[in-house]
């Protein structure tokens, strides 16, 4: 069986995500119709964008927090890397990982905090591409708008050959097999072709099915209601729309089609400029990050010209929403006392260690969070002998692989270094 372009995507991971997002879009479409009487996928996409970004907001806030705190903790991470520079033995690697982990815990952030949102957004974008390219497969009322015409077509003698000829003459990027024995599949193929037809292509349908002019007019009217956003077909790319509109001298449509990618790139650029940038401690890496931030909006602008306009509307709307979100996030962070958060995290860590039976005296220099206080060797001169004996007896009860066991391994390593 040939691939169907506009039916639901069944690829692993993307298929279920597309189905879920399509389900949300369908419900939004129905709610908008019930509330306003308007049937328009473009409006539904804008509302869908707000819903998705609302769901992702906790991750956005987490990413912003990581970017802000990374500037504060980078000197400490650099000091740890310098301390263990050139040491590749197992104990040194474990000690470095332990000290690095403690620094992250001190600031209350995760090392993966800067990339989680990107990893989540990428499959969402790919899935939305499928949804906006295959709208009839996901929005029930859109699919039903073709039913009358499809019923008339399949009752026409030789319709399979006629539809095959339309696909060939219009050079449609849809793979179909009208010889399939399953009528429901053939019906889907017909919807695929009709939904993908350009405006001139409907003239061919008029000629090939002269007895169905009423059904054809009704279908075209429905498509223009729900599938066009200010004259732009959301399933066509802005570039395709611009070419067709220029030929028809529809310059207002050209302007709208141009605005979609332009606003997409502009809002992304503003969003990047407003975001706190993580400090990676390297001037070279910082320059690379700056270059990437400048290039990404341009890539967004160029790519939006060639993807469905529906995806461009999502991209532009998400950029605007993110700019608004960023304004509130920046104001929120202005009220945050970073030093107070660090003290609270230090207190939590201390209580956790004490609960596990690890006294503060046992912790190596990784626990001294002040950058200036990081040393190459742990200072053991101030340890209380009684507490050391008590701590030593507790080592026997510590489970292998636990945080306490790792802390003891680090301490033993530093003890040996101090005697050299």
Image (spheres, rainbow, N blue to C red):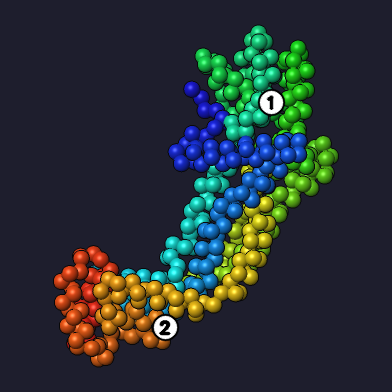
> Which residue is at a point 67% across and 10% down the rendered structure image?
156
Q: Tell me how many marks there are.
A: 2
Q: Which residue is nearer to you in this view: 303 or 346?
A: 346
Residue plotted at (50% across, 67% down): 66
Q: Is residue 200 visible?
A: no
Mark found first going from the N terminus, 1 or 2: 1
Q: Residues within 10 Å of mark 2 (few under 14, many from 20)?
A: some
Q: Where, by quadrant of the figure, is residue 93 drawn?
A: bottom left
Tell me whether circle 1 and circle 2 mark residues in contact (CB < 8 Å): no
In this rendering, the answer to whether 79 lies above or below 203 is below
> Can you name the residue that lies furthest to the top here?
157
Q: Position of residue 195 (x, y in %)?
A: 66, 29
Above/below status of 130 relative to 78: above
* Residue topped by disc 2: 371
Between the residue at mark 1 and the residue at mark 2, the CA separation in whole angstroms equals 66 Å
Left/right of residue 256 with respect to residue 45 in the rendered view: right
Q: Residue at x 63, y 70 (%)?
A: 331
Say if residue 211 shows up in the picture.
yes
Query: Residue 294, percent across and down?
Result: 61, 64
Q: Is residue 178 above or below residue 252?
A: above
For this view, does 362 lie left or right of residue 208?
Answer: left
Q: Position of residue 127 (x, y in %)?
A: 54, 42
x then y, percent, for residue 387:
21, 84
In the picture, the disc for residue 145 is 1
Q: Nearer the viewer, residue 332 or 136?
A: 332
Quadrant the C terminus occupies = bottom left
- Label 1 crowding class (10 Å Cα cut-off): few <14, some 14-19, many 20+? some
Query: For this rendering, which residue is in front, 340 or 65?
Result: 340
Q: Is residue 131 toward the left or the right of residue 284 in the image?
A: right
Look at 48% across and 75% down and name the residue there: 341
């Amino acid at each position: 069986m040939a691939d169907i372009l506009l039916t639901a995507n069944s690829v692993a991971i993307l298929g279920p995500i597309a189905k879920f997002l399509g389900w949300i879009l369908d419900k939004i479409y129905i709610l908008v119709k019930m509330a306003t009487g308007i049937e328009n996928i473009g409006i539904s996409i804008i509302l869908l964008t707000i819903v998705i970004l609302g769901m992702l907001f906790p991750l956005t806030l987490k990413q912003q927090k990581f970017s802000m705190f990374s500037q504060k903790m980078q000197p400490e991470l650099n000091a740890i890397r310098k301390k263990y520079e050139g040491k590749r033995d197992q104990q040194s690697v474990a000690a470095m990982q332990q000290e690095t982990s403690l620094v992250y815990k001190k600031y209350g952030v995760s090392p993966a905090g800067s990339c989680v949102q990107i990893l989540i957004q990428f499959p969402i974008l790919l899935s939305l591409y499928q949804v906006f390219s295959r709208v009839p497969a996901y929005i029930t009322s859109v699919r039903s708008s073709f039913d009358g015409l499809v019923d008339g077509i399949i009752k026409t003698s030789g319709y399979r050959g006629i539809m095959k000829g339309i696909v060939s003459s219009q050079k449609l990027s849809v793979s179909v097999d009208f010889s399939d024995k399953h009528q429901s599949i053939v019906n889907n193929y017909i919807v695929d072709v009709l939904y993908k037809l350009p405006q001139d292509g409907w003239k061919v349908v008029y000629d090939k099915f002269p007895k169905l002019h009423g059904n054809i007019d009704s279908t075209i009217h429905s498509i223009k209601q729900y599938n066009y956003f200010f004259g732009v077909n959301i399933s066509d790319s802005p570039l395709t729309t611009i070419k067709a509109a220029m030929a028809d001298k529809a310059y207002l449509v050209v302007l709208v089609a141009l605005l979609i990618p332009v606003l997409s790139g502009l809002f992304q650029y503003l969003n990047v400029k407003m975001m706190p940038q993580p400090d990676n401690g390297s001037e070279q890496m910082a320059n690379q990050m700056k270059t990437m931030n400048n290039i990404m909006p341009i890539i967004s602008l160029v790519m939006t010209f060639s993807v469905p306009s529906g995806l461009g509307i999502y991209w532009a709307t998400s950029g605007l929403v993110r700019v608004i979100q960023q304004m509130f996030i920046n104001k929120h962070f202005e009220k945050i006392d970073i030093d107070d958060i660090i003290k609270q995290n230090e207190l939590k860590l201390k209580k956790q260690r004490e609960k596990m039976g690890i006294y503060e005296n046992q912790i190596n220099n990784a626990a001294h969070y002040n950058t200036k206080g990081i040393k190459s060797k742990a200072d053991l001169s101030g340890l209380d002998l009684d507490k050391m004996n008590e701590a030593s007896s507790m080592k026997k009860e510590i489970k292998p692989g636990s945080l306490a066991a790792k802390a003891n391994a680090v301490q033993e390593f530093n003890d040996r270094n101090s005697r050299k």
